[in-house]
Image (cartoon, rainbow, N blue to C red):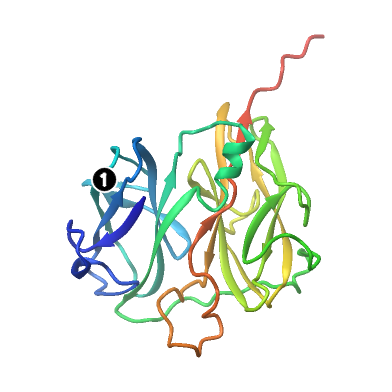
Amino acid sequence: MGIGLYSAPNHDHQYSIPSLVHLNHSTPLECYLYFSNQIPDTTEFFVFVLVDFRQVPFEFEGDDANILFNASVDPYEEKFFSITVSNLTRGKHDMAIILAMEPNNHSMDPSFRLSTDLSSVRGIRLNLIVDNDTHYNIEYDNSTNPLFKQCSSDYPLNDGLLMTKEACSKKLWYTETGIPGENIPYWINCAAGDDYLNKFAIITFMDYQQVPINTNSSQYAIFGNLSPGEKIAIPSSIMVPNETGFHEFMAVWIPLPFEYHDYPSGSYEYCTQDKGLASSVRIGLNVSRLPNVVY
């Protein structure tokens, strides 16, 4: 598949939107999402928008503002979708337009779950400068946080994240059963590349709607800063939805918060870090009621 962001519904380089965009505060971001389906099957996906690592309402194909929209593209079809993001405040913003692929595939088959690693979402990131380039200060966590655990140097993870039920575990977490309202603890294991510093944000989604990093918490993103080769485990938890049936849970790794645009050649300390956002394995959650108790 191919995706891109354009100022007009025309797949020509002159209309391609750069990664750094300047706007007036009274002007919404209006753009066209390009999607090229290069397989012989219809491709379905959800579309959502992040501004400063929070999911925000937007207009999609003229529909009223919402936080999540359905889209599909026929086999071998190329298609443009109009997107409008309004109410942007002054300052510098980190924005991402994200496509969640196969959102209605709830297969619990391990091979499907493993196939979603790094590939459950596609994303296009922008730095928006609205009148000025001031942004809020981020407090980055690192291995000195007493709640985090250090993973050994041989932990099989490099420049990314892995979700497990135990800290620094090598056993992948990809399915779960639960009852409505149950609290499920887990760990987000993170690693920097062996040869470079790593700065990142992590956000989590239940059924493609953003949820706090921990149950009963107002924190919607983790910001981390790791030394080369450093590997840590971050304690987290989710609340099982009230609706019975199958649900989808995932985390998204977003490198270089507020610093996604191109850097001067060779001089920037994070220039070797992979700038592409990526998803964790998509965890299938099967929710059922408690069995009837017979007395």
**Front residue of this view, candidates 193 and 31:** 193
Above or below, comparing residue 263 to residue 127 in the picture: below
Above or below, comparing residue 28 to residue 77 in the picture: below
Task: Identify the residue shown where x is 58% and y is 35%.
Answer: 241
Q: Indicate left or right for 129 with 295 as reference.
A: left
Report the quarter where the C terminus lies: top right
Q: Indicate left or right for 286 with 32 as reference.
A: right
Task: Identify the residue shown where x is 39% and y is 43%.
Answer: 46
Residue 254 drawn at (x, y percent): 52, 64
Which residue, as the protein is rendered here, is positioned at the far bottom? 267
* Residue type, mark 1 in image: Asp
Residue 199 drawn at (x, y percent): 58, 73
Q: What residue is disc 1 on?
A: 64
Residue 188 falls in image quadrant: bottom right
Task: Identify the residue shown where x is 55% and y is 35%.
Answer: 247
Above or below, comparing residue 165 to residue 258 in the picture: above
The crowd level at tag 1 (other Cα within 10 Å; few <14, some 14-19, many 20+) is few
Task: Identify the residue shown where x is 52% and y is 77%.
Answer: 137
**Front residue of this view, candidates 274 and 76:** 76
